[in-house]
Image (cartoon, rainbow, N blue to C red):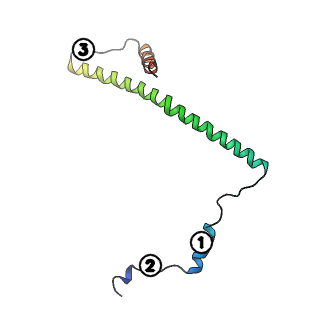
Amino acid sequence: MSTSDSYIIQDAAPESSNEQDEVDSLPSSIVSSDEGSEEESDAQKEWEASLQQLELLLTMVVVPAFGKYLGRKCAYWSWAKYMEWMYPVQVRYTNKAAFKAAGVVEAAATL
Protein backbone atom coordinates (compact mmCIF):
# COMPACT_ATOMS: atom_id res chain seq x y z
CA MET A 1 0.00 0.00 0.00
CA SER A 2 1.56 3.29 -1.08
CA THR A 3 1.16 6.65 0.66
CA SER A 4 -1.15 7.95 -2.08
CA ASP A 5 -3.53 4.99 -1.56
CA SER A 6 -3.99 5.79 2.11
CA TYR A 7 -5.52 9.20 1.33
CA ILE A 8 -8.13 7.96 -1.12
CA ILE A 9 -11.68 8.10 0.22
CA GLN A 10 -14.10 5.61 -1.28
CA ASP A 11 -17.38 7.03 -2.56
CA ALA A 12 -20.60 5.82 -1.01
CA ALA A 13 -22.79 3.39 -2.88
CA PRO A 14 -24.57 5.03 -5.84
CA GLU A 15 -28.06 4.04 -4.66
CA SER A 16 -27.61 5.92 -1.36
CA SER A 17 -26.60 9.11 -3.18
CA ASN A 18 -29.75 8.93 -5.33
CA GLU A 19 -31.89 8.69 -2.21
CA GLN A 20 -30.12 11.74 -0.80
CA ASP A 21 -30.76 13.68 -4.03
CA GLU A 22 -34.47 12.87 -3.82
CA VAL A 23 -34.68 14.15 -0.25
CA ASP A 24 -32.78 17.33 -1.14
CA SER A 25 -35.10 18.08 -4.04
CA LEU A 26 -38.26 18.21 -1.91
CA PRO A 27 -39.80 21.68 -1.57
CA SER A 28 -38.96 23.41 1.71
CA SER A 29 -42.52 24.63 2.29
CA ILE A 30 -45.93 23.52 1.13
CA VAL A 31 -48.01 26.30 -0.41
CA SER A 32 -51.76 26.08 0.09
CA SER A 33 -54.34 28.26 -1.55
CA ASP A 34 -56.86 28.60 1.28
CA GLU A 35 -57.80 31.97 2.81
CA GLY A 36 -56.18 31.24 6.18
CA SER A 37 -52.70 31.19 4.73
CA GLU A 38 -53.37 34.45 2.90
CA GLU A 39 -54.41 36.16 6.13
CA GLU A 40 -51.39 34.70 7.91
CA SER A 41 -49.21 35.99 5.10
CA ASP A 42 -50.65 39.51 5.50
CA ALA A 43 -50.16 39.32 9.26
CA GLN A 44 -46.59 38.13 8.73
CA LYS A 45 -45.90 41.05 6.37
CA GLU A 46 -47.32 43.54 8.88
CA TRP A 47 -45.24 41.96 11.66
CA GLU A 48 -42.06 42.21 9.58
CA ALA A 49 -42.86 45.84 8.70
CA SER A 50 -43.37 46.75 12.34
CA LEU A 51 -40.11 45.01 13.27
CA GLN A 52 -38.32 46.98 10.57
CA GLN A 53 -39.79 50.24 11.92
CA LEU A 54 -38.69 49.32 15.44
CA GLU A 55 -35.19 48.52 14.18
CA LEU A 56 -35.01 51.88 12.40
CA LEU A 57 -36.16 53.67 15.54
CA LEU A 58 -33.49 51.95 17.60
CA THR A 59 -30.67 52.48 15.12
CA MET A 60 -31.52 56.06 14.18
CA VAL A 61 -32.73 57.56 17.47
CA VAL A 62 -32.31 55.51 20.64
CA VAL A 63 -28.79 54.11 20.22
CA PRO A 64 -27.20 57.41 19.09
CA ALA A 65 -28.91 59.39 21.88
CA PHE A 66 -27.88 56.84 24.50
CA GLY A 67 -24.33 56.75 23.14
CA LYS A 68 -24.10 60.52 23.14
CA TYR A 69 -25.33 60.66 26.76
CA LEU A 70 -22.84 58.02 27.88
CA GLY A 71 -20.05 59.70 25.92
CA ARG A 72 -20.68 63.04 27.60
CA LYS A 73 -20.89 61.39 31.01
CA CYS A 74 -17.58 59.61 30.38
CA ALA A 75 -15.98 62.86 29.17
CA TYR A 76 -17.10 64.78 32.27
CA TRP A 77 -15.86 62.00 34.55
CA SER A 78 -12.48 61.73 32.81
CA TRP A 79 -12.04 65.53 32.79
CA ALA A 80 -12.79 65.67 36.53
CA LYS A 81 -10.25 62.90 37.19
CA TYR A 82 -7.64 64.71 35.09
CA MET A 83 -8.23 68.02 36.88
CA GLU A 84 -7.95 66.33 40.28
CA TRP A 85 -4.73 64.62 39.20
CA MET A 86 -3.11 67.62 37.54
CA TYR A 87 -4.19 70.46 39.82
CA PRO A 88 -5.05 70.63 43.53
CA VAL A 89 -8.82 70.88 43.01
CA GLN A 90 -11.78 68.75 43.96
CA VAL A 91 -14.58 68.42 41.48
CA ARG A 92 -17.93 67.88 43.19
CA TYR A 93 -21.42 67.82 41.84
CA THR A 94 -23.70 69.52 44.32
CA ASN A 95 -26.95 68.43 42.68
CA LYS A 96 -26.54 65.10 40.88
CA ALA A 97 -30.13 65.02 39.59
CA ALA A 98 -29.74 68.43 37.96
CA PHE A 99 -26.40 67.34 36.49
CA LYS A 100 -27.96 64.19 34.98
CA ALA A 101 -30.94 66.16 33.66
CA ALA A 102 -28.59 68.69 32.06
CA GLY A 103 -26.68 65.82 30.44
CA VAL A 104 -29.89 64.40 28.98
CA VAL A 105 -30.96 67.81 27.70
CA GLU A 106 -27.54 68.45 26.14
CA ALA A 107 -27.51 65.06 24.49
CA ALA A 108 -31.01 65.50 23.08
CA ALA A 109 -30.48 69.14 22.03
CA THR A 110 -28.75 68.39 18.73
CA LEU A 111 -30.73 65.31 17.68
Label 1 Cα crowd, 10 Å radius (few <14 / some 14-19 / many 20+): few
Q: Which mark is residue 89?
A: 3
Say which label, 3 or 2, has the lower sequence index: 2
Q: Is residue 100 above or below residue 54?
A: above
Distance CA(mark 3)–CA(mark 2): 76 Å
Image position of 44 with respect to 86: above or below: below
Q: Which one is in front, 111 or 88? A: 111
Q: Which residue is painted at 41% across and 80% down in the image?
A: 8
| Residue 18 located left or right of residue 33 | left
Mark 1 secondary-structure assignment: helix
Residue shown at 52%/32% (left/top)? 58
Q: CA distance from mark 2 to mark 1?
A: 19 Å
**Residue 43 percent coordinates (x, y):** 70, 41
- What is the quadrant of residue 81 in the picture? top left
Answer with left or right where residue 46 lies relative to residue 100.
right
- Quickly name the residue at label 1: 20
| Picture layout, residue 12 above or below residue 70 | below
- Viewer-nearest of labels 1 and 3? 1
Q: Residue furthest top?
A: 94
The residue indicated by pointer 2 is 9
Which mark is nearer the camera, 3 or 2?
2
- Upstream in the sequence, badge 2 or badge 1? 2
Tag 2, which secondary structure?
Answer: loop
- Residue 9 screen position, x and y as percent: 44, 78
Numbered circles on residues, count: 3
